[in-house]
Image (cartoon, helix red, strand yellow):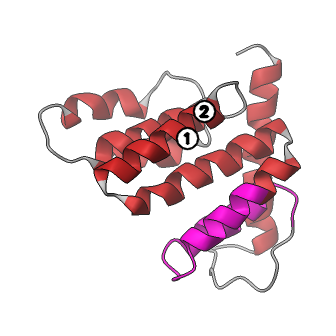
Amino acid sequence: MQVRLAFAVSFADPDPDPDELALARPLLEGLDQRSNPLLAQVVSLIKDAGTSGVTDRAQSLNAEIEAAGLPFLHRFVELALAFHHAVRGKDQGLAATIDRLRALTVTGDFAYFTDIAHLVGAPPLPGPSTTRWTTSEDDVRSAWRGRVQTRQEHLLAGN
């Protein structure tokens, strides 16, 4: 649960302190749960969104995920990449990531990840969303775009 909490918090807080992931690491030591350490690496990608090297690290992480036989984690990597491309303002990278994410969520599992990928960037959803948000879609888009803008400001400030 701590790794998943770190995943959620990482979109809003690029600073390592307080670092939910640091709290998760001791809990993972000695456990044979391959998915949690890999998900922890996704958290690191999200925290570094907008910086150089994220795309290369994501490719390496996808190879590790494949080798571990945990393909459901590819969705998390692609969501992290969508956030990264949105922060960098890379529309082509975001569009390619959305396409991959759409393919990974075609069964409906984690389909809201594809919606979030659209919301962090500018592209409108291709059709009505099946996701039922707790507030309006405009409010959710504004919140995700706010996270992107906050990260951009954070990076511009030299953090």
Q: Is residue 144 left or right of residue 7?
A: right
- Please, what is the three-letter code of the amino acid marked with disc 1? Gln
Q: Position of residue 66 (x, y in %)?
A: 39, 52
Q: Residue at image x 39%, y 39%?
A: 40
Q: Which residue is mark 2?
A: 56
Mark 2, secondary structure of its residue: helix
Q: Is residue 6 left or right of residue 37?
A: right
> Could you tell me how far apart the alpha carbons at marks 2 and 1 are, in whole angstroms?
5 Å
Q: Which residue is mark 1?
A: 59
Instruction: List the single residue furthest toward the left.
Output: 30
- Callout 2 touching callout 1 (CB < 8 Å): yes
Question: What predominant SS class does the magenta segment belong to?
Answer: helix
Is residue 148 magenta-colored? no
Mark 1, secondary structure of its residue: helix
Q: Is residue 82 left or right of residue 157?
A: left
Q: Which residues are magenta?
A: 96-123
Q: How many marks?
A: 2
Q: Is residue 112 above or below residue 147?
A: below
- Please, what is the three-letter code of the amino acid marked with disc 2? Asp
Is residue 116 magenta-colored? yes
Q: Position of residue 157 (x, y in %)?
A: 80, 16
Q: Is residue 10 above or below residue 99?
A: above
Q: Is residue 78 left or right of residue 24?
A: right
Q: Residue at image x 71%, y 66%?
A: 99
